[in-house]
Amino acid sequence: GENVEQHPSTLSVQEGDSAVIKCTYSDSASNYFPWYKQELGKRPQLIIDIRSNVGEKKDQRIAVTLNKTAKHFSLHITETQPEDSAVYFCAASRAGTGNQFYFGTGTSLTVIP
Amino acid sequence: DTEVTQTPKHLVMGMTNKKSLKCEQHMGHRAMYWYKQKAKKPPELMFVYSYEKLSINESVPSRFSPECPNSSLLNLHLHALQPEDSALYLCASSQEQRDWGYEQYFGPGTRLTVT
């Protein structure tokens, strides 16, 4: 089955700096890669996603890049703000699995004011 | 309406109790999911329903019993739970997968404590 690894497990940055979280996956058939943000005590919420027919996607301060050859994808947050502090999970999914998500282990991001 | 709702928000139950968790969505999604989540860990898939039929059971103990009465509702019946079952239980829904995956919309969860 699919195995998704996520690094780093914790990340601290100064407000205004950039943050990068990386995930690798094992199943070359995976074709959908969402990123979820989960604030303390809240539900996971999708912040950005990418399909395997695209190499990069951007939404304001958030971007995701995908390298299918190397089987890794990354979340980039620029101009970080304290409200970006949360746990971030990457996931991978492939056709024929009932939209089952294979989650990474999570990254706890702290933005220091 | 792009929201998944869950009740109750909190539940404390003894090991001999029977209780149920409820989940509802009105987005027309035909796939619904139950997850268990421990603090700072990723959601752990328990069950998947597709068109009201159970399609995935991730070897969950029989003390957890899912039910999908209709396309908008999902229940999780609990009986004879153990203290290690204490966790946040999340419900999610999504469009049925075709060639691509789709966003899963999560509910706020039920914080379950087993005493």
Image (spheres, coloured by chain):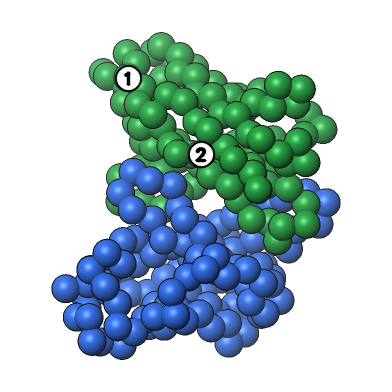
**Can residue B28 be seen in the rendering of this structure?**
no
Q: CA distance from mark 1 to mark 2?
A: 19 Å
Which of the two residues, B1 or A75, is positioned nearer the viewer here? A75
Q: Which residue is mark 2?
A: A104
Check disc 1 and report its element: helix, strand or loop. Answer: strand
Amino acid under disc 2: Gly
Q: Which residue is mark 1?
A: A12
Mark 1 and mark 2, same subunit?
yes
**Can residue B112 be seen in the rendering of this structure?**
yes
Image coordinates of residue B70 in percent, x first then y, are: 62, 84
Amino acid under disc 1: Ser
Q: In the shown orientation, is residue A18 left or right of residue B40?
A: right
Image coordinates of residue B45 in percent, x first then y, are: 51, 59
* Drawing shade for chain B: blue
**With respect to residue A35, does A11 lie above or below?**
above
Q: Chain of mark 2?
A: A
Q: Residue at x 58, y 82 (%)?
A: B68
Q: Residue at x 34, y 61 (%)?
A: B88
- The crowd level at tag 2 (other Cα within 10 Å; few <14, some 14-19, many 20+) is many
Q: Quadrant of the C terminus of chain A?
A: top left
